[in-house]
């Protein structure tokens, strides 16, 4: 069963990434056939704040995972 899960993952994860990219504003065209590019000036302060919180949370999770991994080691390493 684990081999089937592995094969499903090989197709699912690249497919999911491609689906997200295909719907991205740069690739998706509007009714006039023109792609809408995203500019940094279109971002609000809330978007920037959410990005900072996400990066902080990611870093905090990474640090915590390293601490937990070091707790599993015995005296010999």
Image (cartoon, grey):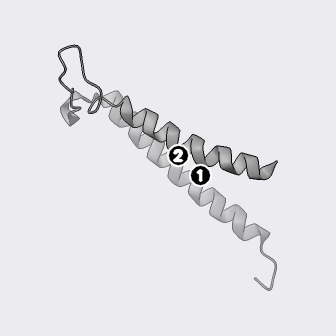
Dot 2 crowding, Cα within 10 Å, few <14, some 14–19, many 20+: few
- Quarter of the image for residue 71 reads bottom right
- In percent of width and height, residue 64 lies at 63, 57
Residue at 78% x, 69% y is 72
Q: Would you say 56 lies left or right of 31 here? A: right
CB under 8 Å between discs 2 and 1: yes
Q: Secondary structure at mark 2?
A: helix
Identify the mark at residue 27; answer none if there is no mark. none
Residue at 19% x, 32% y is 41
Using the image as rendered, state which of residue 70 and residue 1 is in the foreground. Answer: 1
Q: Would you say 42 lies left or right of 19 here? A: left
The quadrant in which the C terminus is found is bottom right
- In percent of width and height, residue 36 lies at 21, 26
Residue that sits furthest to the bottom in the current view: 76
Which residue has dot 2 on it? 57
Which residue has dot 1 on it? 61
- Quarter of the image for residue 52 reads top left
Q: Secondary structure at mark 1?
A: helix
Q: Would you say 67 lies left or right of 19 here? A: right
Using the image as rendered, state which of residue 10 and residue 66 is in the foreground. Answer: 10
Residue at 27% x, 30% y is 43
Number of numbered discs: 2
- Quarter of the image for residue 62 reads bottom right
- In percent of width and height, residue 20 lies at 43, 34
- In percent of width and height, residue 37 lies at 21, 31
Residue that sits furthest to the top in the current view: 31
Residue at 60% x, 49% y is 10
3D distance between C-alphas at marks 2 and 1: 6 Å
């Amino acid at each position: 069963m684990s081999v089937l899960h592995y094969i499903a993952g090989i197709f699912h994860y690249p497919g999911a990434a491609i689906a997200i990219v295909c719907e991205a504003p740069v690739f998706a065209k509007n009714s006039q056939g023109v792609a809408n590019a995203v500019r940094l000036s279109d971002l609000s302060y809330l978007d920037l704040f959410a990005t900072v919180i996400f990066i902080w949370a990611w870093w905090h999770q990474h640090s915590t995972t390293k601490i937990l991994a070091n707790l599993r080691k015995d005296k010999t390493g």
